[in-house]
Image: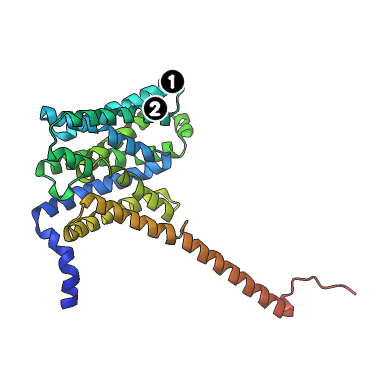
């Protein structure tokens, strides 16, 4: 009993506090939505677009702090404007999309740094950069719940459409789907998830929430439907584990969550049945041993000889 208590007490202790309960609720919403979205981002090849959008929200956050409006409003406006500019540059020029992303989002981030340098530093601005999940306020929690709910409904309602477009955009166009609308809907969901996640893990670490769960699920299965279940589960387990560990060790919550995700990805990279490094080595070794044993049995038994009998 004492051994069980020594194990469960540190695990359950954080959940007796209101701030930890708010953190778990916010993290759960963020994990499910970000985990779902990460599957499509991996499939489309938009992994680093999440990083770009997360940096682009900085000027919106600083302007919201200056004007006194909710951070989520400023961040969402900045994200949507930046995404819109990227789409406009891509459609009206022959530049590749990664080029327009590099120009526009670095410009937005630089603008945010300039605004931050001339604005009296507030603790809230530091939290947006580095995250403070255990210190999340009731207002921020409601913002995360509302934004996450919108993104979740859009993703679930259009899951089949997004999947078809992600696998083959040309085929979805020939079937009559409005591929531009699909693309913009997915980008809008990305902006929503970035804004929600930034308030929890910070602008700097939000990219991990949008890449690692989907990448982990991709290494586990070839079926996209299974990815849509595995990725949110990985994200949720990482968030809850990170909250418990950061509470007991008194370290950064956002950073701990990302490190737990990275640990799960590392184990997946080594042992996953689809592309796990050690699993593949063991499977090849087993196949070679089985083939060698089969050849030995065949050569030892005349009845199993592969040579054809001669006539005469």
**In the image, residue 281 lies at what x, y percent?**
52, 63
Identify whether 71 is placed above or below 280: above
Q: Residue at the spot x=55%, y=67% of the render? A: 285
**In the rendered view, does 163 fall on the left or right side of 108?**
right
> Badge 1 is on which residue?
93
Q: Position of residue 226 (x, y in %)?
A: 38, 52
Q: Nearer the viewer, residue 120 or 241?
A: 120
Task: For the residues labelled 1 and 2, say whether their Cβ atoms are less than 8 Å apart.
Answer: yes
Locate residue 275, reporting x and y percent.
47, 56
Asked if residue 34 shows in the view, the reply is: yes
- Residue extending farthest right: 312
Residue lying furthest front in this view? 117
Could you tell me which quadrant the C terminus lies in?
Answer: bottom right
- Colour theme: rainbow
Q: Which residue is mark 2?
A: 100
Q: Indicate left or right for 261 with 280 as reference.
A: left
The numbered disc on residue 7 is none
Q: Looking at the image, is mark 1 or mark 2 nearer the viewer?
A: 2
> Front-most of 58 and 222?
58
Query: Which residue appears at 13% of the width and 33% of the height?
Result: 70
Q: Is residue 199 left or right of residue 289?
A: left
Residue farthest along the top direction in this orientation = 92
Say which quarter of the image contains residue 205: top left
Q: Is residue 226 in view?
A: no
- Percent position of residue 146, x then y: 18, 39
Taking the image as shown, residue 61 lies to the left or right of residue 169, namely: left
């Amino acid at each position: 009993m004492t051994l069980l208590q020594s194990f469960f007490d540190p695990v359950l202790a954080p959940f007796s506090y209101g701030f930890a309960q708010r953190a778990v609720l916010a993290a759960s919403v963020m994990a499910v939505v970000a985990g779902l979205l990460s599957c499509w981002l991996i499939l489309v090849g938009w992994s680093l677009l999440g990083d770009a959008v997360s940096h682009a929200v900085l000027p919106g956050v600083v302007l919201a702090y200056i004007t006194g409006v909710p951070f989520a409003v400023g961040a969402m406006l900045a994200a949507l404007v930046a995404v819109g500019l990227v789409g406009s540059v891509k459609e009206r020029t022959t530049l590749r999309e990664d080029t327009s992303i590099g120009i526009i989002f670095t410009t937005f981030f630089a603008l945010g740094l300039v605004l931050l340098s001339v604005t009296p530093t507030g603790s809230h601005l530091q939290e947006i950069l580095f995250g403070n999940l255990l210190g999340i306020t009731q207002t921020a929690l409601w913002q995360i719940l509302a934004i996450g709910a919108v993104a979740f409904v859009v993703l679930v309602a259009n899951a089949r459409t997004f999947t078809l477009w992600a696998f083959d955009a040309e085929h979805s166009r020939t079937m009559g789907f409005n591929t531009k609308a699909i693309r913009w809907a997915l980008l809008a969901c990305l902006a929503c998830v970035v804004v929600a996640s930034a308030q929890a893990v910070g602008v700097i670490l939000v990219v991990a929430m949008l890449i690692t769960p989907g990448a982990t699920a991709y290494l586990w299965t070839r079926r996209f439907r299974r990815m849509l279940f595995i990725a949110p589960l990985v994200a949720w387990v990482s968030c809850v584990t990170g909250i418990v560990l950061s509470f007991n060790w008194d370290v950064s919550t956002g950073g701990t969550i990302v490190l737990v995700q990275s640990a799960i990805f590392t184990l997946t990279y080594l042992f996953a049945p689809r592309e796990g490094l050690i699993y593949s080595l063991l499977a090849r070794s087993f196949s070679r041993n089985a083939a060698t044993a089969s050849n030995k049995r065949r050569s030892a038994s005349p009845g199993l000889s592969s040579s054809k009998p001669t006539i005469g």
